[in-house]
């Protein structure tokens, strides 16, 4: 998702309420059934229980996210 949004490491540390990064609410409703929760990608190296928690959220059939493993 960050690739689709153009978010790169150069933006690390910037507030998400600023002039460069911000969130907008366009009032779009997403059905609960369209949201998939899975474990985060790339956290296995940490060896912690957090690596398996379902903290990765994506929209079903969204072309910008890879399938859960």
Image (tube, grey):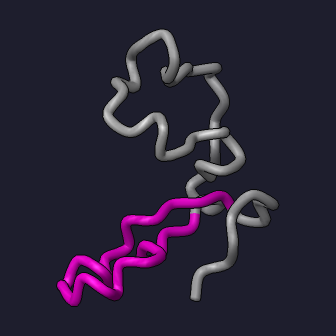
Q: Splitting the image into 4 quarters, where does residue 46 fall? A: bottom left
Q: What residue lies at 32% left-to-right and 84% top-to-bottom?
A: 52
Number of disc labels: 0
Q: What residue lies at 57% left-to-right and 40% top-to-bottom?
A: 7
Q: Splitting the image into 4 quarters, where does residue 14 fall? A: top left
**Residue 61 drawn above or below residue 26:** below
Q: Quadrant of the C terminus?
A: bottom right
**Residue 46 drawn above or below residue 7:** below
The picture places residue 48, in percent across and down from the top left corner, at 18, 85
Residue 50 is a magenta residue: yes
The picture places residue 16, in percent across and down from the top left corner, at 40, 25
Q: Specify whether 27 is left or right of 55.
A: right
Q: What residue lies at 47% left-to-right and 75% top-to-bottom?
A: 41
Residue 60 is a magenta residue: no
Q: Specify whether 32 is left or right of 40.
A: right
**Residue 1 drawn above or below residue 46:** above
Query: Residue furthest toward the front?
Result: 10
Query: Residue furthest toward the top?
Result: 19
The picture places residue 58, in percent across and down from the top left corner, at 59, 60
Q: What residue lies at 66% left-to-right and 58% top-to-bottom?
A: 59
The picture places residue 2, in percent across and down from the top left corner, at 59, 49
Which residue is nearer to you in this view: 67 or 33? 67
Magenta range is 36-59
């Amino acid at each position: 998702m960050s690739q689709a949004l153009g978010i790169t490491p150069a933006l690390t540390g910037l507030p998400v309420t600023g002039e460069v990064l911000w969130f907008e609410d366009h009032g779009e409703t997403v059905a609960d059934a369209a949201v998939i929760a899975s474990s985060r990608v790339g956290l296995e190296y940490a060896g912690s229980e957090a690596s398996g928690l379902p903290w990765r959220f994506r929209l079903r059939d969204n072309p910008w996210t890879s399938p859960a493993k």
